[in-house]
Image (tube, rainbow, N blue to C red):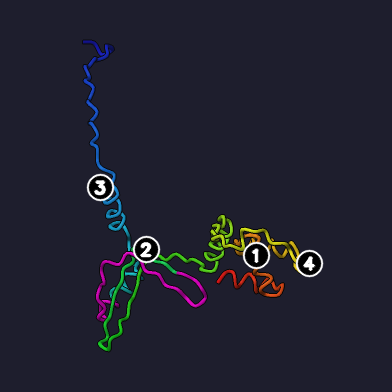
Amino acid sequence: MSAEEPKIENVEEEEVPTLEDVPVEQLKGESAAAAAARHRQSKAEKKNKKAILKAGLKEYPGVKQVSIRSAQRLNLTIDDPEVFISDNGNGTAVFVVFGKFNMEDATQQRGQQAVADLLKPKDEVPVEATESDETPEELPENIAEKDVQMVIEQTGLSRNAAIKKIKEHGGDIIEAITSAQK
């Protein structure tokens, strides 16, 4: 063989390994455990936990979420916390919680709930027909048509029942509405 002739080698292709089917539930469980194992504690966190254990607090396992509501209507939630408990003997317990918290404003949540309630269609309340509802009742001169319509909208009563309620309360539509809603 001369130095200029290239050397030819036979190369066999390697087989690609086949992938195994693993259930999704198993993957989720492994990823959560792996994430918990990967959590690196800061020096301050290690130092604080060591001091807490030295003070006699014991780990309280099995807590999945801690919710704290403050007087300023703020909700603090801590998912997957590390909880330590100290029973000081007089029936009260002291809890120390480590974890990342999420802050939620309760007033904002209530506002969003109120908007959602307003957007929902009102459920019509069926009113049983009475004998006086069968014959149409004429509108007296001292009662306006818009007052009758308002009582009907607010209470779900029939026209005749609304006129009757307004007559019972001497034309006071507020009293007619409140008595019909009782």
Which type of secondary structure does the marked residue at label 2 adopt?
strand
Q: Which residue is mark 4?
A: 141
| Mark closer to the chain start, 2 or 3 | 3
Which type of secondary structure does the marked residue at label 4 adopt?
loop
Q: Which residue is mark 1?
A: 162
Amino acid at dot 1: Ala
Please provide the residue range marked out in magenta.
51-75
Q: Which residue is mark 3?
A: 26
Q: Is residue 31 left or right of residue 114?
A: left
Which type of secondary structure does the marked residue at label 1 adopt?
helix
Q: Closer to us: mark 4 or mark 2?
A: 4
Q: Quadrant of the C terminus?
A: bottom right
- Spatial CA span between label 2 and label 3: 21 Å
| Mark closer to the chain start, 3 or 1 | 3
Q: To which quarter of the image does residue 81 belong?
A: bottom left
- Spatial CA span between label 1 and label 4: 15 Å
Residue 54 part of the magenta-drawn span: yes
| Mark closer to the chain start, 2 or 1 | 2
Q: Residues within 10 Å of mark 1 (few under 14, many from 20)?
A: many
* Picture coordinates of residue 161, whole percent (x, y): 63, 64
Q: Residues within 10 Å of mark 3 (few under 14, many from 20)?
A: few
- Spatial CA span between label 2 and label 1: 53 Å
Q: Which residue is mark 2?
A: 79
